[in-house]
Image (cartoon, rainbow, N blue to C red):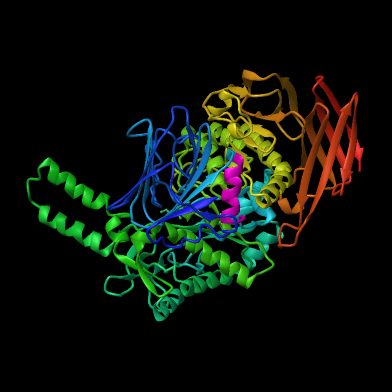
Amino acid sequence: MKYFDIGKPFNTEAVINYEHIQVSESIKPFDLKRDESIVLTYKMAKDEIIYGLGENMRGINKRGGIYESFCSDDPTHLPDRKSLYGAHNFFLIDGIKSLGIFIDFPSKVTFDMGFTHPNEMVITIHGLDARVFLIEGSKNEIVHKFLKAIGPSYLPPKWAFGYQQSRWSYETADKIKEIKDTFNEKDMPLDTIYMDIDYMDDFKNFTISEERFPNFKNFVQEMKADGIRLIPIIDAGCKIEKDYEIYEEGIENNYYCLNEKGQPFVGAVWPGKVHFPDFLNQDARRWFGDHYSKLVDLGIDGFWNDMNEPAIFYSENGLNEAIDYAINSKGKNLGIYDFFTLKDKFMAMANNDQDYKAFYHQVDGKRYNHYDLHNLYGYNMTRAAGEGFLRNYPDKRILMFSRASYIGMHRYGGIWTGDNHAWWEHLLLNIKMMPSLNMCGFKYSGADIGGFGAHSSSELLIRWSQFAMFTPLFRNHSAMGTRIQEPVSFDDETVDTLRHILKFRNALVSHIYSQFMMKNKTYEMLFKPLSFEYDDPASKNVEDQILFGDLMLMPVYEANAKGRYVYLPKDYVVWRIQSFEDYRMDLYMPGHHYIEAELNETIIGLKKDCLILLNQPENRVDDISLDRMTCIGYIENEASYQLYSDDGETFEEGQTMTVTITYDKQLEFSVENPLCKEIVYDVMTSDNRRHKGVYHV
Ligand code: MIG
């Protein structure tokens, strides 16, 4: 791995491990131009594929599109949307040789990946100083080197791998209790309930509405007694209000971003007028990070950071300008252009570049314009929280994920992919996005299951849950005004189907958790495109199946489908699951197949010589025991499986069990470092026989 500096780059702290990284003499194969901005160009060979770019629209192969890294809050992710909430400038060109590239630059970068000209890649870095990393090797080696350079992921607690229920908003303690009780009544797994902005007093960070959540500490304990953890939201902007502690402390210590004149910059978000903490200033970071403790001390074990692009509904300047323009237009016969200008004045008020250029950060005593460091804001908010947790609770894992992010933020928290919609297209997008998020370091991630905006149908929610069952963050969240989307709020048949899916996910928790912990350590992706494991030509073009370790995920993502076409590069056993107890296994030869999957069936491919261990499903992750495990597999001669397990709550190192099964007319088990007492097995062998039984360890 090498890096090449253009000008004097800002240290974003994305890359932290420089041990095997050298300075590069050139930026080949790129041509470099530097005048008003930095432009890198590269001629792409005909069949080269581009992987990566983290949270972005379009496919696993990013070629043919145009993308922009500039953390933005736009709740309508249409196919041509160029930027979402994250700025993930790492990608990989895969041709005869492979090359990984990371553009470490904290402001706007445009990636024209063969959009303007099919064979030309044009990367425009909107500034004059950047560090560009170049990584050679195979695809897997490149990602491995990159993940090592940016360091391991933060560690969420194990319960954060359970089913999580959210809604904007469950406004009162009673409502939250009711949700929990309904889940209990309907025997539906649940580990957390989210508290969206309405739990706060007037949307003020680190406050709790006395009226809607009286005696909060008791309430938290009461929920916990039933195994449910509450996860409150924290927003970036802090309300301007005299005597509000955060406001006063921030002003007193100069912790807020300042405008040109050196006064705290004013924007407006949920609480009305706010100041934005200067998360790039380490003192401010420390101060803000310590405030999370207030809630932790009340029994809260996790948070989500929102609106940290930062989203700005309007600024005083923008609003005044628009209002003046409107007043001037009053009574006039507006031509069509004047009318549109008037309309745009209001429409363009939110998240406006003019506003981003109107405030400043203090970094190590130097002043920087926000626009130039824009993509580091959400990252440093989450860093403030993450550093605070480690400082104040060094032995406790706390759930944290963020909306905005930059590469490197995964060391402090995960991400969710923001305001998607209850559209089938967004289920498919979720599938395609997982590998590229992993490439950029974000392992603890997931989308709003069922869709945030728009009304979800039961069918969409079921299909989405069948896929998301594998994403580390497994959360159903939806917006105000949309159809109630909890799995318990649908018709009986849907509730039954979702119960089976959620229970199955719970049975997978020890596996997903173990994969997360092991792959984090070895700097590998959890989700991979097929071409990262198979080098046949057809695997390169698969955009709607992905690998999760030895499992092939082949989700159904279309309405009214009763199955789907699947490409299998090798022979696979298709595991067709209705519930933990009820499933089929069928052997398929390599090639293209139509595989049936009724609405209540999840289909998963098991590759040859693979095993997977499941725990018995419970309704809470805390209740999971490893004593009795279920083993599913497909074996020709020998298959081995590792299960990592630890307490899931502290940073104490755990243990790894290895289960090996060999097959020669009959199955032979061997278990190293046993963590379980019994293995209930159901294994298919390549001679198309099924072997069922119980192995006592
Ligand atoms: O302007 O807190 O993406 O998950 O429910 C909307 C309310 C603010 C945006 C987040 C969404 C959350 C919502 N927030």
The residue nearer to you, when weighing 608 against 583, is 608
Majority secondary structure of the magenta segment?
helix
Q: Is residue 677 visible?
A: yes
> What residue do we see at 39% from left, 64% from top?
271
The residue nearer to you, when weighing 501 against 142, is 142
Which of the 4 image quadrants contains residue 123? top left
Segment tinted magenta in the rendering: 140-153
> What residue do we see at 53% from left, 55% from top?
22
Which of the 4 image quadrants contains residue 566? top right
> 566 above or below 512?
above
Q: Is residue 271 magenta?
A: no
Give left or right: position of 269 versus 501: left
Q: Is residue 175 visible?
A: no
Give left or right: position of 679 versus 35: right
The outermost residue toward the front is 25
Give left or right: position of 352 versus 478: left
